[in-house]
Amino acid sequence: MDQSPTSDMNLLKQQLEYRKRLMDKINEIHSADNLNTILLHIKDSIAALFTAQRITIYLADAKRNLLISKVLSGTEVKQIVVPISDASLAGYCALSGTVLNIKDAYNDHELKMISSNLKFDHSWDQKTGFVTKQVLCVPMKFQRTLIGVIQIINKQNGTPFDDTDITYALELGTSLSIAIHNIYRLQVTTKIIRQRSRYNYLLDRNILDDKSIEKASVHPDVAKFGLDAVLMREYKVPREEMAKALSLFFGTEFIKYEPAAPAMEEELLKRIRPDRLMKEWWVPYKVENGVLYIIMDDPTDLGRQDMIKFIYPEYKRISYVGAFRDDIQSYIGLFYNRGASLGSGGSIDELINKLDATDEPEIEQESSKVSEQDSVIVQLVNKIIIDAVQGKVSDIHIEPYPGKEDVIVRTRIDGRCKVYQRIPYKYKYAIPSRIKIMCGLDISERRKPQDGKIDFKKFGPLDVELRVATVPTAGQLEDVVMRVLASGEAALPYDKLGLTERNSKVLMECINQPYGLVLVVGPTGSGKTTTLHSAISVINTPETKIWTAEDPVEITQRGLRQVQVHPKIGFTFAAALRSFLRADPDVIMVGEMRDQETAEIGIESSLTGHLVFSTLHTNSAPETVTRLLDMELDPFSFSDAILCILAQRLCRRLCDCKQEYQPDRKELEDIIMEYGVEAFKKTGINPADIRLCKATGCPKCGDSGYKGRLGIHELLQGTDEMKTLIKRKSEIEAIRHQAINDGMTTLKQDGILKCFKGLTDLKEVRKVCIK
């Protein structure tokens, strides 16, 4: 029987209303300015449009081949993740690019008729108590690119989805795809524009280019360390230049970390946990003239500013200043570790008072009583380590004494030891035992030395490693020395090594040779590894394969293949060198030539087309030659291999508070005598023009007058004349004389020249070298 004209009119009217509602939704989609507005604000209205109970909108993650729900009707499940495959309804829709209209999701026969692997995951219904029946899945695509899937579930009247639903769902999917694509493209463009303006200062000075910023922005470390840090590390942007660029961009002061910064008010710190500050990259810095100063990695972030105003409502004026993320992290550690946060348990004096307040334990029972649960001992050791790391300490010395003398804790800063704290004698066994527990050593063995490593992030808030050595001392006691390892630090730029013009030029020529041997020598802790890595960073390019064997790996560089040796299991420097030769190297760095075998393999490698870098523990460059010859190395092979030997020392650098003065006649004569009268004449320096500086002291340097260290060097070049002397196994004086004729300045001479520049003083130079 034919339908009446009235019913036809009603149907047409319904379709027009349906169409109007759909167009309203589509207009709403295209007027939205961000993805959240599109997806969240219209989810319920889309379900109502199709008179459906639920809707899920998935977006595609092409890299991981997944669909991730961005919109879910209902509150039982927060997110659904399904693979793009034929094993699920939405996954099959995305994979095939076709519409799925399922009448009964529980009907396996209906699903198998579409694809043999297709099945409905009943677990979602079991979790939520919702019963899925009809399912309509529509793919969202933009120019063959999969954007996602719209999944509409259960018509409210229980009927299957019809052709009209499918048509409108496809139209909706097309509109969503276009809108999502355009918003994503706009976000990417905006991000690039903002990044470019952020680094305008660097771009204008050709320190960076657009391509470098684009590459760095997709680096996996950006999320953790920030784009600024990645650019400084990967593209060698100087820290000072980056700070200037960001200061200009943000229009604020940009500060760096100073361990001597004044303490922050404890009441302000208590309002927010340090772990939250670590995640959000800000920290209260100081209160001055009623203004609260906040350090942030992005001082223009309005969202964080609003939150900070909520936390500190009493401050009507809040000033936001910029800082690098690592400096913010250091300030958080500094401020909170002065109090009782970050697991330190209080100041060092408070912890020692707690020790004094406890009963004196029996010495025989001391080691057995120490465990992870001895909270004050745990806090005390953590505090010692945390203070050392924040104070830029290189070594921590725990020194117990027999009888009732206090345990002395000394720290080495800039090469000089000073007393950090005295701890009651009754804990002279407990503290070494706690440290041994932290690095997995045998606490019952006190008769022989042991060595190990502490991964401190397992015990405290700082991600740092310490190398530990225990040494038995008189009275059945043990000294413990902990070296703070510079874990994951970037290489020092070559121009920051402090080499003289001649030394820099000669070393640069040597490291650009296709093969040969370059040695850096000096005592432990003289910066040999830092110098090697700085030199290698110059030739670290994608065209050059570089292998390094180190113990431990302290400095990391992208592009190097770095290996940690393990002598205890037989993986020595010599074994690593042999394996490198089978691994197609251009450049090899071996941490140390400790024995004849390693030295012989290193020399052999340099003679077979490889550039080899290594270190040695000797006092001067000429002594290195005789030392290697004493190892019974073949003098002919060694002379052919050697390119240069750089000897170095580290001496303390004068702080900015230094005071300049003109030396008197007697002091000038002594300096010239020390330099060498004939050698001084060759420098062309007029004695009347010489100005020296002396240490004074200020709060910034802890009243020591010194802050940081600088290198002094002597560089022996492998000239033809030098190679002839090596072949003859000449005496050390002949080798030194020839090296000086070749242009070498001795360690002391280099140090004196740096005194003339006001970098250090003669007292410091005399402490680290003789000639």
Image (tube, grey):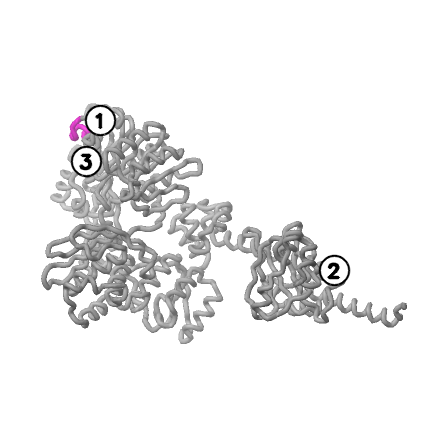
Q: Which corner quadrant holds the C terminus?
A: top left
Q: Quadrant of residue 589?
A: top left
Q: Which residue is mark 3?
A: 680
Q: CA distance from mark 2 to mark 1?
A: 89 Å
Q: Amino acid at mark 1?
A: Ile
Magenta residues (range): 730-737
**Residue type at numbered disc 2:** Thr
Is 124 left, or right, of 510 in this rendering?
right
Instruction: State the CA–CA distance, disc 2 to disc 3.
Output: 93 Å
Residue 164 image position (x, y, % from top left): 76, 62
Residue 34 visible at all: no
Q: Amino acid under label 3?
A: Phe
Compared to residue 266, the image places residue 436 above or below, namely: above
Residue at x-position 45% and y-position 59%: 250
Residue 152 placed where, x, y %? 67, 64
Residue 734 lies within the magenta run: yes
Residue located beneath label 2 in the image: 167
**Residue extending furthest bottom?**
314
